[in-house]
Amino acid sequence: MPQEQINDIRNIIAPMYLLHDLRIYFDHLLPEDKQNEKRENIVKTLEVKSFEHLEEIYMLLIDKLDKLFQYLVICSK
């Protein structure tokens, strides 16, 4: 599989991993280093200023999830 396709697949499914990271962050008691790791991953991936901008994080994540589901609908036809 060409590298471009691999990168596209990673970008398409990335919102699922970010959603998982948010769920783990908010629903589980994590050591501080793991909390920081999850926050940094989310901030870096979504390119937001900080984790405190949760509304922006949610809106970006919803947009990316919408694109993922649109892609899955197109692929399923």
Image: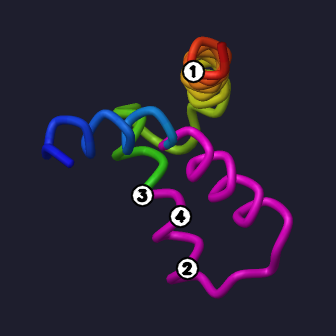
Q: Is residue 74 left or right of residue 4?
A: right
Label 1 with label 3: CB-CB less than 8 Å: no
Label 4 residue SS: helix
Q: Mark 3 points at which residue?
A: 40
Find the residue positioned furthest to the right.
27
Q: Which residue is drawn at 51% across and 41% down?
A: 13
Label 1 with label 4: CB-CB less than 8 Å: no
At label 4, which amino acid type do we have? Lys
Front one among 46 and 17: 17
Q: Name the residue under label 2.
A: 34
Front one among 6 and 28: 6
For the record, the magenta segment spans 14-40
Which label is found at residue 38?
4
Label 4 with label 3: CB-CB less than 8 Å: yes
Reading the chain from its start, which is encountered first: label 1 or label 3? 3
Q: Name the residue under label 1.
A: 75
